[in-house]
Image (cartoon, coloured by chain):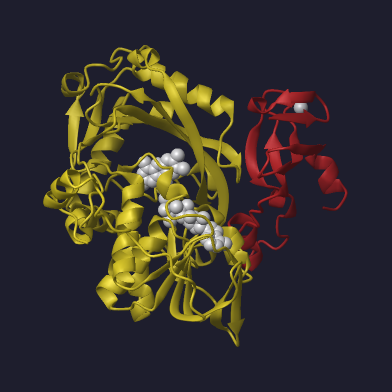
């Protein structure tokens, strides 16, 4: 599996650390516990198919990426900088 | 037909023509009292105990593939009761006791072999942790022996004891731990359930879960709708997809775990040996193959095969621990889809829909759990209250924060458990 880092180019996935579904971009605004927090921390769509997830390019640029990947075929379809995705209002 | 040594002898002399099928292949009926979705170890054990312990036999197990084709036939077969936290500890202790009586109970040879498990440690801090875990196991009524350097050297002479990075300081020995023949467990429960009247329906995928006014009414399948008063979702790695049919999101992320087996060799590894620091564990099957595995591939996956970097890592760890491994030829590798929960512990509970139950979150440790999980889910479905050994496996613990069971203290990231 190779991940096309927007800054570093196509790199072996061993350079990256997987964090999980890209829910990390949607941290609930309110700090009081609610179903939103349960959903953010624990619950997952866990699709068999395309999904957006967070990967950290630790052995490269050190950036956080949002990678679109198919969980059945492992095909990597796109990688964007998490900061750009977040900025775009995801 | 009752299996026995005498039958083997008699059938052997008469051309093995007298064996009957171990279970029927019935057409689905229009309605059952109970439908179990998923014919893996947990689903089959649930059906068995519903029939055997609660007299509930108007039950169907609906399996999209074939019995034993999921994780139950893909795991590395380790059976142990060395969990640490209350909630898990009594449950796995109960499971091991059920294992110890399973062959007599099922009249089926599941090849349960209590060959002992040794968890190695490599530092003083790790020794303290092992001693603490051992004490927890003893308090639970199970067995644990703390082995020193020399004892491990004597028991496992083939290890690289003086490895520069991971010298072996000792091990936590769990004599009642061991292995079993994985698919025989599925077959034994299947046969036991079938002979009590449970319908095992294979090649039948559940595609929808029906409910009316908050109460479950049945399922949609690739072989038509089937009505039911109660339904249990027991789909392991596919739990999220099945639960989504009932409008639920589970605290689960599915990951692939790989395993490996070498060509058959003469007996060389008597026990199960785990090398936690290298994410490596190994045992030898009764056929002679060295069966070993490591950690997850670490990213979400529904491919029942893994990636090469993890295979390479597992081989490296194996060579670090026991250099003799390099002489063996690797025969096969495969993967299974693990239902990784947010705290690493399982869920056996009711849902927001009346009559709909969920059993999932087994991570990579659900084989040893098969007997107690089926026992507890059958108890819950029959009596509407959880079995005393599984009260902690609540679905709402994540939302309430009460009773989170994170054995390794890794936090709420699904793949870290
Ligand atoms: C490589 C590997 C090593 C492992 N090693 C160990 C070990 O040493 N010790 C241990 O305790 N555990 C181990 N495990 C974990 C253990 O195998 C699992 O936790 C356990 O088998 C899961 O429960 P199950 O047997 O019910 O799952 P499965 O056998 O996967 O059963 C689930 C069933 O549900 C069916 N299903 C899914 N969706 C549908 C649908 N829509 N309709 C109908 N049917 C459906 C599937 O086809 C499947 O047959 C290991 C797993 C793997 C992959
Ligand atoms: Zn990069």
User: Which residue is nearer to you in this view: A56 or B282?
Assistant: B282
Q: Which chain is yellow?
A: B
Residue B272: x %, y % from top left: 28, 33
Where residue B381 sits, quadrant-wise, is bottom left
Residue B125 relative to residue B6: left or right: right
Q: State the residue in front, B35 or B309.
A: B35
Where is residue B78 drawn, in percent x and y? 32, 41
Residue at the image point whose x is 47% and y is 59% from the top: B360
Q: Is residue B355 visible?
A: no
Task: Quadrant for the N terminus of chain A, please.
Answer: top right
Left or right of B25 on screen, residue B22: left
From what the image shows, is residue A18 above or below residue B215? Answer: above
Q: Hey, which quadrant is residue B152 in on the image? A: top left
Q: Using the image, determine if residue B206 lies above or below residue A14.
A: below
Q: Colour of chain A?
A: red
The residue positioned 60% from the left and 55% from the top of the image is A41
Residue at 38%, 80% in the rendered image: B384
Which residue is nearer to you in this view: B366 or B250? B366
């Amino acid at each position: 599996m190779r991940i096309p880092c927007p800054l570093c180019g196509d790199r072996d996935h061993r350079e990256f650390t997987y964090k999980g579904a890209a829910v990390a971009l949607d941290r609930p605004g309110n700090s009081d516990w609610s179903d939103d927090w349960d959903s953010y921390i624990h619950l997952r769509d866990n699709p068999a198919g395309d999904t957006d997830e967070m990967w950290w390019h630790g052995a490269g640029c050190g950036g956080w990426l949002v990678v679109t990947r198919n969980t059945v075929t492992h095909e990597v379809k796109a990688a964007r900088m998490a900061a750009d995705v977040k900025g775009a209002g995801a | 037909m009752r299996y026995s040594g005498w039958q083997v002898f008699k059938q052997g002399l008469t051309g093995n023509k007298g064996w009957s099928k171990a279970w029927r292949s019935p057409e689905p009926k229009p309605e059952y009292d109970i439908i179990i979705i998923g014919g893996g170890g947990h689903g089959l054990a649930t059906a068995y105990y519903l029939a055997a312990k609660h007299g509930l036999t108007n039950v169907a197990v609906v399996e999209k593939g074939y019995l034993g084709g999921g994780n139950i036939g893909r795991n590395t077969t380790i059976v142990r009761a060395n969990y640490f936290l209350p909630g898990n500890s009594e449950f796995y202790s109960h499971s091991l006791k059920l294992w110890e009586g399973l062959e007599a109970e099922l009249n089926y040879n599941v090849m349960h072999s209590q060959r002992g498990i040794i968890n190695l440690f490599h530092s003083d801090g790790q020794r303290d942790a092992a001693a603490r875990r051992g004490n927890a196991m003893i308090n639970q009524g199970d067995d644990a022996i703390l082995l020193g350097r020399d004892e491990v050297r004597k028991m496992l002479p083939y290890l690289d004891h003086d490895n520069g990075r991971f010298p072996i300081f000792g091990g936590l020995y769990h004599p009642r731990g061991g292995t079993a023949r994985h698919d025989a467990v599925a077959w034994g429960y299947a046969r036991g359930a079938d002979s009590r009247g449970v319908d095992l329906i294979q090649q039948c995928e559940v595609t929808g879960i029906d409910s009316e006014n908050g109460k479950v009414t049945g399922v949609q399948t690739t072989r038509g709708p089937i009505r039911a008063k109660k339904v249990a979702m027991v789909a392991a790695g596919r739990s999220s997809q099945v639960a989504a049919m009932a409008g639920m999101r589970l605290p689960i992320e599915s990951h692939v775990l790989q395993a490996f087996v070498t060509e058959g060799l003469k007996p060389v590894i008597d026990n199960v040996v785990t090398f936690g620091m290298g994410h490596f564990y190994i045992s030898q099957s009764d056929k002679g193959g060295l069966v070993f595995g490591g950690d997850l591939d670490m990213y979400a996956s529904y491919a029942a095969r893994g990636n090469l970097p993890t295979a390479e890592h597992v081989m490296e760890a194996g060579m670090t621990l026991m250099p003799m491994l390099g002489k063996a030829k690797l025969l096969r590798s495969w993967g299974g889809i693990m239902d990784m929960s947010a705290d690493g512990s399982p869920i056996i509970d009711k849902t927001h829909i009346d009559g709909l139950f969920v059993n999932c979150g087994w991570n990579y440790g659900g084989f040893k759990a098969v007997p107690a999980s089926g026992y507890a889910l059958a108890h819950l479905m029959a009596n509407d209250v959880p079995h005393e050994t599984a009260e902690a496996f609540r679905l709402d613990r994540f939302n309430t924060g009460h009773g989170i069971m994170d054995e390794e203290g890794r936090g709420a990231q699904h793949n870290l458990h």
